[in-house]
Amino acid sequence: MILFSAIIFLVNLKLIYSEFYQYNSGLNICNMVIENRLNEIVKESFPELLSYSFSLEYDEVKDGFAETWETSETSYTFTLDSLFKEADEGVVIGLLAHELSHITQDIGYSKFEVWFDNFLYSRFPKYSLLDERNTDLTVILRGYGLNLLKLLRYIEDKYPEYVTEGLSVNEIKILLNSV
């Protein structure tokens, strides 16, 4: 009887491990696909960022949906909120295009200019509003307006309490119809 119970226990343990492994390897494959797509986006629409490398991770993000970390002079890491693991690729592309647009706006800034920009952004709501709206316009001009629209609809669904500082869904629709 004890031998039978031990065998059942080991079979269940193997099944649990197998499901865990498949789930985690699926995330790694998903990350690789998104990172490859990210590199394509840089080549196609953000050529000024070709000399930079980018990586992607998912974690809990406290004040927003993504954080961009400059990890060296030529590399960045995007940390996306964990809820974006389940998002459609088009939604994630919208978020990454938005973050890439932020980087293009700050390229060439000195350390003092970066500090000053962050100071203004964190202390003056009108400055951050202008920065976010300008970033969204850049996303549209670079060809990712539909992805930005998907992103905002996803945010409306998953984060209903969030109020955008960037362009609204209606403003993006108007701009996409006029392009």
Image (cartoon, grey):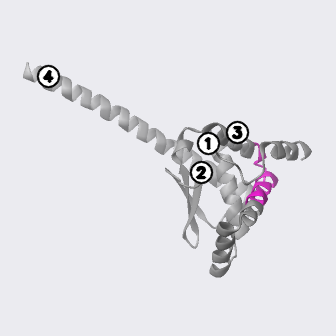
How crowded pointer 4 is (Cα within 10 Å; few <14, some 14-19, many 20+) is rated as few
Main SS, magenta region, reads: helix
Mark 3 — residue?
153
How crowded pointer 2 is (Cα within 10 Å; few <14, some 14-19, many 20+) is rated as some
Earlier-in-chain disc, 4 versus 1:
4
The disc at residue 5 is: 4
Earlier-in-chain disc, 2 versus 3:
2
Where does residue 50 sit, x and y in percent of width and height? 66, 64
Q: CA distance from mark 3 to mark 1?
A: 10 Å
Q: Which residues are magenta?
A: 132-146
Front position among marks 2 and 1: 1
The disc at residue 65 is: 2
Mark 1 — residue?
159
Residue at 47% from the left image edge and 45% from the top image edge: 28
Where does residue 55 sit, x and y in percent of width and height? 54, 57
Q: Is the residue 8 above or below the residue 57 in the image?
A: above
How crowded pointer 1 is (Cα within 10 Å; few <14, some 14-19, many 20+) is rated as some
**What amino acid type is highlighted by mark number 3?**
Arg
* Label 1 residue SS: loop
Residue at 55% from the left image edge and 38% from the top image edge: 86
Residue at 69% from the left image edge and 76% from the top image edge: 109
**What amino acid type is highlighted by mark number 4?**
Ser
